[in-house]
Amino acid sequence: MTMSGNRIEVIYDIETQKLFEEITTNDPADLGISVVSVYRREIDKTGKEISGEMKSFWTDEVKDLFGDKELYFESMWPWFEEADRIIGYNSFGFDNPAMNGIYSAGDFTKLKHFDVLDEIKKVLGFRIKLDAVAKETIGAGKSADGLDAVKWWKKRDLESLGNLKKYCEMDVEVTNKVYDFALSKGKLMFKDKWNEYREIVVDFSYPVPVTEAVPAEVQMGLF
């Protein structure tokens, strides 16, 4: 939290260099990360966005293509470390373990993470793809898929890497819009496997600090 009481939020997504069928483990860290797209923003106490910036960070393997002026993994860690909430979709199961494989300052999974999919699963008991939620909630879906992302990485020409970056950043934008909708409206929508429209109630609000939740006289009585 900043000196003004505003919060720093980071919404992020990753793309990998390989598919699970290409490795011998189930560990996302073994897939290798090609690019990480991050939207960092400052919000006030009401949740209103004060400022925001999108950046994409690349593995060192493409420095010969982009040159030193581009951003690489070593530059992105402060954005995550200062965040009051790090927001992803399926980040607990995929993105966070993959990021932990390249994070040398400790355990990346111990930072202040918030997984939209995990919150949905708490309500429904099962998982839903981001595309399914986004189409019904905000009227927009994903522009490609993980298979396309790996193909673009393997081609590794400037056009393909441009497509990869655009795709990853669009996933961040979609996740951001879904998160903001849920935060303000307290609900998300999707169509289930029977193509039936569903609406679920969710609570994405920040926990109320104990000092705010418990009256001062009650706190004094605890001691």
Image (tube, rainbow, N blue to C red):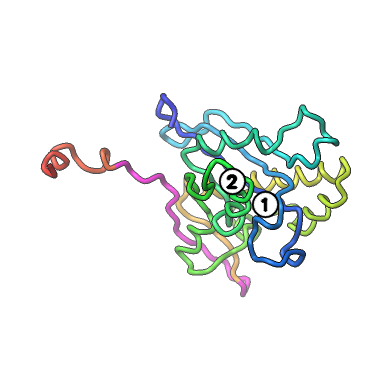
**Which residue is disc 2 drawn over?**
177
Count residues near mark 1 (Cα–Cα under 10 Å), then give few for <14, some for 14-19, many for 20+: some
Q: Specify the quadrant that holds the N terminus.
A: top left
Where does the image place residue 96, in percent across and percent down from the top left?
58, 52
Whether label 2 touches label 1, CB < 8 Å: yes
- Which range of residues does the magenta coloring cover? 193-209
User: Above or below — where is 18 with respect to 104?
Assistant: below
Count residues near mark 2 (Cα–Cα under 10 Å), then give few for <14, some for 14-19, many for 20+: some
Residue drawn at point x = 78 percent, y = 59 percent: 147
User: Above or below — where is 123 with respect to 170?
Assistant: below
At mark 1, the secondary structure is loop
Q: Quadrant of residue 217?
A: top left
Query: Could you tell me the amino acid type at mark 1?
Result: Ala
Along the line of sight, the residue nearer the viewer: 144 or 164? 164
Where does the image place residue 83, in percent across and percent down from the top left?
50, 37
Where does the image place residue 65, in percent across and percent down from the top left?
85, 36
Query: Could you tell me the amino acid type at mark 2?
Result: Lys
Decide whether residue 15 is among the magenta residues. Answer: no
User: Above or below — where is 50 with respect to 47?
Assistant: above
**Which residue is disc 1 drawn over?**
140
Where does the image place residue 173, in percent across and percent down from the top left?
64, 44
Q: Quadrant of residue 196?
A: bottom right
> Is 59 left, or right, of 137 in this rendering?
right
Along the line of sight, the residue nearer the viewer: 204 or 111? 111
Residue 180 showing in the rendered view: no
